[in-house]
Image: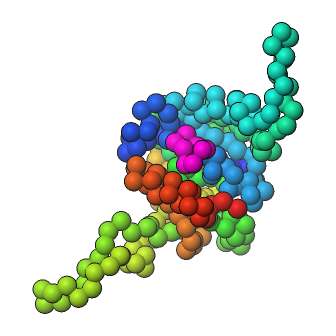
């Protein structure tokens, strides 16, 4: 299936990294997080990517324009100005990069992609990793028969919890996920007709469009109880970096 990745946001909460590059280009290990994400989708057989660009989109364009060059063995004839790839180390991907505006919001970016979209497609944000079973997500969407499906997750705990009785701490520990509600996990199955719910560049995907789908009974939830980690802050990046460096990345298949 076609995979749409929203990669145009400003990444203001990760400004230490995003002052010079867009957030999807922040590295985990040796590769930008967007490459980790694309490899995960490709491991399920989805290798056609449509990337919505915005803030510093040229950085992502230049990266993929030179992707084969940087990941292959080369023979260079300097006098003839010829470059020959003698051993390719690149994936079998088709990557379509579309400028969707500097200040366009999430729903508006999808609307700007309308002419490039398949009738059905997977969609995610370019700043989070998970081990969502994409095959099961696709099956769930088709079984439900609704316009859209969102992956529901419980957010990882950031704070310890206290159990108190009569002014005395009875238990001190980490907050268990069951204490938290379900949130948007960022892995969607959408149909092109969803664009009818999007008005303009200022449309927030997570606002009126999804709320209208809910009111019409057209939004399904695919429950994911596995690994999920966004990269909104430096702390989040360090969490992902540590997991990767320890060789325990759940998103590597």
Q: Nearest the camera: 223 or 60?
A: 60
Q: How far from the left and from the top, in percent, is residue 161?
A: 29, 76
The answer to which quarter of the image holds residue 207 is: bottom left
Q: Which residue lies furthest to the left in this view?
A: 167
Q: Nearest the camera: 141 or 214?
A: 141
Q: How is the image coloured?
A: rainbow
Q: Nearest the camera: 57 or 152?
A: 57
Q: How far from the left and from the top, in percent, is residue 12?
A: 38, 41
- The answer to whether residue 242 is visible is yes
Residue at position x 46%, y 47% from top? 204
Residue at position x 53%, y 64% from top? 228
Left-right relation of 138 to 242 = right
Q: Residue furthest top?
A: 79
- Above or below — where is 252 with respect to 172? above
Q: How far from the left and from the top, in percent, is residue 71?
A: 73, 37
The answer to which quarter of the image holds residue 88 is: top right
Residue at position x 57%, y 30% from top? 59
Q: In which quarter of the image is the C terminus?
A: bottom right
- The answer to whether residue 101 is visible is no
Residue at position x 56%, y 61% from top? 246
Q: Does the magenta stretch include residue 111?
A: no
- Above or below — where is 133 with respect to 41? below
- Give the number of marks: 0
Left-right relation of 55 to 167 = right
Q: How far from the left and from the top, in percent, is residue 36?
A: 63, 50
* Residue numbers of the magenta segment: 24-32
Q: Nearest the camera: 129 or 57?
A: 129
């Amino acid at each position: 299936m076609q995979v749409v990745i929203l990669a145009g946001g400003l990444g203001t909460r990760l400004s230490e990294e995003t002052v010079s590059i867009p957030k999807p280009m922040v590295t985990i290990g040796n590769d930008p997080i967007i490459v980790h994400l694309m490899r995960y989708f490709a491991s399920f057989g989805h290798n056609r990517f449509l990337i919505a660009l915005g803030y510093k989109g040229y950085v992502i364009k230049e990266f993929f324009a030179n992707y084969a060059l940087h990941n292959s063995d080369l023979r260079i004839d300097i006098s003839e100005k010829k470059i020959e790839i003698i051993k390719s180390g690149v994936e079998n991907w088709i990557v379509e990069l579309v400028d969707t505006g500097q200040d366009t919001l999430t729903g508006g970016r999808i609307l700007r992609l309308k002419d490039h979209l398949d009738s059905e497609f997977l969609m995610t944000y370019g700043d989070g990793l998970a081990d969502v079973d994409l095959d099961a997500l696709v099956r769930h969407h088709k079984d439900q028969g609704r316009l859209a499906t969102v992956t529901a997750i419980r957010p990882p705990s950031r704070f310890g919890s206290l159990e108190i009785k009569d002014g005395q701490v009875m238990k001190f520990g980490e907050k268990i996920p069951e204490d938290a509600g379900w949130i948007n996990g960022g892995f969607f199955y959408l149909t092109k007709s969803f664009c009818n719910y999007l008005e303009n560049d200022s449309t927030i995907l997570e606002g009126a469009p999804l709320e209208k789908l809910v009111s019409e009974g057209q939004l399904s939830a695919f429950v994911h109880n596995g690994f999920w980690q966004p990269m909104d802050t430096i702390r989040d990046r360090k969490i992902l970096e540590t997991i990767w460096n320890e060789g325990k990345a759940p998103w590597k298949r």
